[in-house]
Image (cartoon, rainbow, N blue to C red):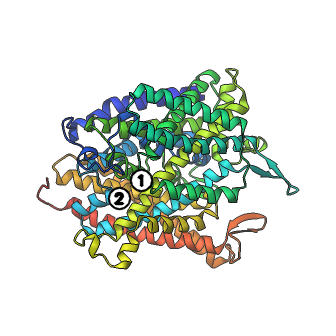
Amino acid sequence: MNGLMILIITIVVLLAAYLIYGRYLARTWGIDPKAKTPAYELQDGVDYVPADTNVVFGHQFASIAGAAAINGPIQASVFGWVPVLLWILLGGVFFGAVQDFAAMYASVKNKGRTIGYIIESYIGKTGKKLFLLFCWLFSILVVAAFVDIVAGTFNGFQTAADGALTPIPANGSVATTSMIFIVEAVALGFLLRYGKLNKWANTAIALIMLVAAIALGLALPLYLSLGTWHILVFVYVLIASVTPVWALLQPRDYLNSYLLVAMIVAAVIGVFAARPDVNLPAFSGFTVNGQTLFPFLFVTIACGAVSGFHSLVSSGTASKQIKNEKSMLPVSFGAMLMESMLAVIALIAVASFSSSAETAALGYTTPSQIFAGGVANFLTVMGLPQDVVFTLINLSVSAFALTSLDSVARVGRLSFQELFLDESIRDEDMGPVRKLLTNKYFATVLTLVLAYFLTQVGYDSIWPLFGASNQLLSALAFLACAVFLKRTKRKSFMLWVPLFTMSAVTFTALVITIWKLASGIAGGTYRWVAGMTTTVDGASVLTAWGAGMQLVFAVLILALGVVVVAQGVRKLLERTPAKA
């Protein structure tokens, strides 16, 4: 087996899935092209903003296809390429794409409301409050992990054995280009809103902006430390999460979507040209490095197979931009399948290296660098310069992560605000405490401050809890959508297997994670020191502060998940009259 054969199988499976299963779901649930969508019905110029299908697709794909679609398969490759490939394909088609479509469909049919509101309408107010608290905690984990990934990609210096700092040109170029992207996105946002140009003119301008940003980034690399980038990225997220979607979110995703799609197309062409060997074992065993295949394969690979975060994007931002119900299938189902393609390419990239020792010798210490190095090696077969391609692929990965950060920070802010909103109380009748808690700036700052503390422990330490929480969120999304479909007399059987599978996976993973964190703190593995990291026997580990914070999050998330699932399953099984 080589990488080309894996890619061909993937393309055939995903294309057939869209044409057959995706269209079947659309026919079964019902699509009304003449219906007035929430984007028009509730248009407010901030969150509800009608946009063309390609623009919303760009937002959806760029938001869901974060660095996790690359990191997950590469980290899970220790189990062998066969289980990773099977879970990406089966999970992507029958779990991930179904969840994303169902969440967007339920949201559009409920005035563009989030999964939280759908839970309130069809399960109950208590379930909604618990779900919103869960979403807020989960958003903090995602922001913490992704900020560290982005800052690591921008980090301009490498520390040598003697402590000397060496500039990293590729990272500096990625940083410059990404900063220019943000400025260009704002300019493009005003052009799209007020320029009244046709979509081809807008596309041409967007491509020119993209090329200019890349050229300037390669020519003028920006060198800043990891700690500085942590702060700057958080400042950016703070601004982006409260800015109207038309001014930054839509145009920046529009720009990024071209880069991201071009990256995937280039990688596919590279695989066809290079036909890389697969040097990973087909299967490494059920227990590898102290982790068992079940449940950790299924929580390590989230984006690319199924990710609960996607349901927040589908129902939180993208559903409010849909102009026609016909757009829901390509925007949700189609974007998820493209992300599965990206995950398979990441698998092929890591499998093309002979060993982890080879990647370490090349200086590839993170999954995104391994991915960029593998794709660059594929394209050098066609005569392209390795260093330029490596820089461009790293740029694309950072674009994925920045886009996801924008969306999840906004979702976290909205979840915290909704937690304290009461439709029976008018804004002018709110007390000072409720007004503070529902203030978007306070909600954003609180979310980001907590995420900043978690960021200091590093994304690799957060990832197991992030993965388990993410997949539990997918179980809750399946549950909410299944109850909605049942109560509106639509078929929901296609959600039952994903619902109970992801519940079993995530509850098991969370219990194991809680046990390990608690045992580490009690046994002294984690030290109560002033800094956030220390070493034990030469190995870098979390301090007890970081482990303690994760333990609190894990216990709360598990408890909230159990209660919401119990309430939802009871509603799912009981006989109830149809709700229009």
Q: In this view, does 232 lie above or below 27?
A: below
Mark 2 closeness class: few <14, some 14–19, many ≥20 residues within 10 Å = many
* Residue 175 in sight: yes
- Mark 1: few, some, or many residues within 10 Å (few <14, many ≥20)? many
Residue 554 image offset from top left, x and y in percent: 49, 68
Q: Nearest the camera: 117 or 492?
A: 117
Which residue is painted at 40% across and 66% down in the image? 416
Residue 419 picture quarter: bottom left
Q: Where is residue 431 in the image (x, y as percent from the top left)?
A: 33, 79
Asked whether, in this view, residue 449 is left or right of residue 281, the answer is left
Using the image as rendered, state which of residue 530 and residue 438 is in the foreground: 438
Q: Is mark 2 on a helix, strand or loop?
A: helix
Horizontal side of 456 relative to 112 (left or right) equals right
**Vertical order, 567 against 389 (above or below):** below
Q: Name the residue under label 2.
A: 476
Q: Position of residue 211 (x, y in %)?
A: 59, 30
Identify the residue position indicated by label 1 in the image: 308
Above/below status of 462 relative to 202: below
Disc 2 vs disc 1: Cβ atoms closer than 8 Å? Answer: yes
Query: Which type of secondary structure does the marked residue at label 1 adopt?
Result: helix
Question: Could you give the CA–CA distance between mark 2 and mark 1, rounded to whole angstroms?
Answer: 8 Å
Question: Extreme right residue here?
Answer: 162
Name the disc covering residue 52, or none.
none
- Direction from residue 137 to residue 495 in the image, left or right: left
Specify the amino acid type for callout 2.
Leu
